[in-house]
Image (cartoon, rainbow, N blue to C red):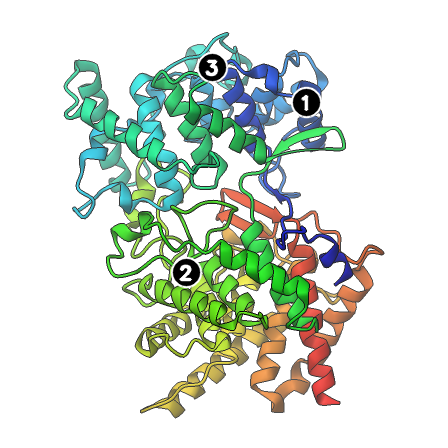
């Protein structure tokens, strides 16, 4: 508790570092090259960062200790070359060997190739087309940009401006040494299709490229004008686009291609926002992919209340006031295109991101506010009512909730040539749905539509897998998903016809989930799971113990014993061993060390280390455990 309170800003919020792989920083280095602002990059500090993150095998990692990843390594190598490191430097020699052994540039992902094309190190012909007429398609037609996930939409629209021009910014960077087959032998074409659908999309892309070569692109100028307008409109006053670096970088690249100058107010604000994502500590320069003050604050408040801090503690009241000030109550963001009944009332992840509130943040903040005794209870009540109304209207057809949009589930979009990160859509997921159900069950939101709640419960129960676990979309992985589901299901009561049968169904699901958690506990008493479980479900729940994942498992087991006191003895030894692990691993400063990435951006492609997870969740778990012990005497 002391450690967490020491991190609180005087304004009331918490904000910890959000760490990702090195590509984010590499792409910011590239952006400064593109804009001719390289003098703003602290070269020695940036070089130090990339060197420190290179591993013994020569590559750079997607997530901690994953053995290295090709595209990440190519972009790190690119950045070091832009920073002036010579080809014969030992670090680059080791990096080159790692990259070539995995197929070289030709085997890297689409976005890596795009960044290299800006430097002349790859050919634009090997990239998919982004026809400007996409912007002309009606919002509610068979397909439009609003069928893309919020993050894909925010990153793609400005790239329409870039791909229309296909610029190369000098001085060119020669990376021929990274072509395993030799650049002269490289085939600058799209990756080979792996099925009929991908073959169809590749053929469409060939047709798009033909229309570009012949100058027969319909609605080209109109589409470009709409893309530029859309991009500029969605910039926050603080300079952010979507609150995420990929959207911000692509917006800046698109505007550069459109001829914007470095002193244009839009560009000035954009660079200022990028600077706000930058950290220079211990002599190393790095850039966060996003910033998470609303998320961090909501989780911190919940953890501190669970740990026994008085609900009217002035520090919690200050945090609650700050959170209420951040509620988005005026702007109808992109979510309103498909949600025509909802009114604004959600929260975003970042300081400012009014276009893109999300359901997960909103549920966490609502639970945090409901846990605080604020001197203005009517203000809390109004805030919670707005949040519940907005979340309710964000429910998808299948009964669950996604993160940013309603029914954003056209999975075929992940098969287009441009979608190789498999993150083009934002369907409903078990973990976000569980958070909504927990918000309703714990937050006293009596006005929440019971029919919607029942449909959400049906969805969550149906998502439980055969072994009792739930998949975790936004945290690694089954330990996260199962913990969230159990925390949601434990306090649920059902009324009306068939309630007894439904309650037995919930009871059985909770026990099965707890049994699975118990089955994957490590010998040291903790729990862990690596990002490998996204590719291989056989290793679900397998990995070195971490503080956050141990806490998640404890939260799930404690929820089960809360719902089923008669079987508490069955799980007591596992709970005691988990608590002992956390107590033994706590540092003298009150927190825990956790280099592992336990947060998920895009499963299989992008992972995160939330530096406050190692403190928030263990405090929450230990607080709930202590409360259980006190209640049992």
Q: Residue furthest right?
A: 588
- Check disc 3 and report the residue beneath it: 119
Residue that appears at 37% across and 24% down:
254
Dot 3: what SS? Answer: loop
x, y percent for residue 288? 58, 38
Which label sits on residue 429? 2
Specify the quadrant that holds the N terminus. Answer: bottom right
Q: Position of residue 456 (x, y in %)?
A: 37, 71
Marks 2 and 3, how far apart at CA = 39 Å
Give the residue at mark 1.
47
Q: Nearer the viewer, residue 479 or 176?
A: 479
Which picture quadrant has residue 210?
A: top left
> Distance between the Cα atoms at labels 2 and 1?
39 Å
The answer to whether residue 451 is above or below residue 564 is above
Q: Residue at x 35, y 46 (%)?
A: 149
Quarter location, residue 94: top right
Label 2 environment density (alpha carbons within 10 Å; few <14, some 14–19, many ≥20): many
Circle 1 — which element?
A: helix
């Amino acid at each position: 508790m002391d450690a967490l309170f020491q991190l609180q800003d005087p304004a009331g919020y918490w904000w910890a570092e959000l760490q990702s792989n090195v590509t984010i920083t590499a792409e910011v280095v590239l952006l400064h090259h593109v804009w001719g602002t390289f003098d703003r990059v602290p070269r020695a500090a940036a070089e130090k960062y990339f060197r420190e993150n290179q591993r013994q095998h020569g590559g750079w990692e997607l997530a901690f200790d994953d053995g290295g990843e090709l595209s990440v390594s190519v972009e790190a190598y690119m950045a070091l070359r832009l920073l002036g490191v010579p080809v014969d430097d030992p670090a680059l020699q080791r990096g080159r060997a790692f990259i070539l052994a995995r197929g070289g540039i030709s085997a890297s992902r689409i976005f890596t190739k795009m960044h290299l094309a800006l430097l002349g190190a790859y050919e634009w012909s090997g990239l998919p087309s982004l026809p400007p007429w996409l912007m002309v398609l009606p919002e509610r037609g068979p397909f439009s940009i609003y069928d893309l996930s919020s993050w894909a939409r925010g990153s793609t629209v400005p790239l329409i401006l870039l791909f229309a021009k296909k610029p190369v910014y000098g001085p060119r960077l020669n990376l021929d040494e990274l072509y395993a087959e030799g650049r002269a032998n490289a085939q600058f074409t799209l990756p080979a299709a792996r099925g009929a659908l991908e073959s169809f999309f590749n053929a469409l892309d060939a047709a798009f490229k033909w229309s570009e070569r012949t100058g027969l692109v319909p609605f080209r100028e109109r589409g470009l004008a709409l893309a530029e307008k859309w991009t500029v409109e969605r910039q926050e006053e603080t300079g952010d686009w979507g609150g995420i670096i990929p959207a911000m970088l692509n917006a800046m690249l698109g505007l550069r291609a459109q001829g914007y100058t470095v002193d244009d107010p839009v560009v000035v604000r954009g660079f200022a926002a990028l600077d706000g994502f930058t950290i220079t500590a211990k002599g190393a320069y790095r850039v966060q992919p996003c910033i998470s003050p609303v998320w961090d604050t909501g989780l911190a408040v919940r953890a501190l209340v669970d740990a026994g801090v008085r609900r009217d503690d002035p520090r919690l009241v200050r945090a609650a006031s700050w959170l209420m000030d951040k509620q988005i109550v005026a702007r109808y963001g992109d979510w309103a295109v498909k949600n025509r009944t909802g009114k604004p009332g959600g929260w975003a992840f970042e300081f400012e991101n009014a276009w893109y509130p999300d359901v997960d943040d909103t549920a966490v903040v609502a639970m945090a506010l409901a846990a605080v005794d604020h001197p203005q209870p009517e203000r809390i009540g109004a805030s919670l009512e707005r949040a519940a109304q907005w979340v309710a209207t964000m429910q998808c057809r299948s009964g669950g909730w996604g993160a940013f949009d309603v029914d954003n589930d056209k999975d075929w979009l992940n098969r287009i040539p441009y979608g190789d990160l498999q993150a083009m859509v934002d369907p409903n997921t078990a973990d976000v749905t569980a958070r909504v159900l927990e918000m309703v069950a714990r937050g006293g939101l009596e006005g929440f539509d019971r029919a919607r709640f029942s449909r959400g419960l049906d969805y969550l129960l149906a998502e439980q897998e055969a072994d009792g676990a739930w998949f975790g979309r936004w945290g690694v992985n089954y330990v996260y998903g199962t913990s969230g589901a159990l925390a949601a299901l434990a306090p649920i009561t059902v009324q009306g016809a068939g309630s007894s049968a439904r309650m037995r169904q919930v009871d059985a699901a909770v026990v099965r989930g707890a049994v699975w958690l118990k089955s994957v506990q490590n010998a040291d008493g903790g729990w862990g799971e690596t990002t490998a479980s996204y590719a291989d479900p056989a290793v679900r729940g397998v990995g070195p113990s971490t503080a956050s994942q141990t806490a998640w498992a404890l939260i799930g087991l404690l929820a089960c014993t809360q719902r089923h006191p008669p079987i508490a003895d069955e799980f007591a030894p596992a709970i005691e061993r988990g608590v002992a692990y956390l107590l033994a691993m706590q540092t003298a400063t009150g927190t825990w060390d956790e280099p592992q990435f336990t947060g998920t951006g895009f499963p299989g492609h992008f992972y995160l280390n939330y530096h406050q997870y190692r403190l928030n969740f263990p405090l929450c778990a230990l607080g709930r455990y202590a409360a259980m012990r006190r209640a049992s005497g």
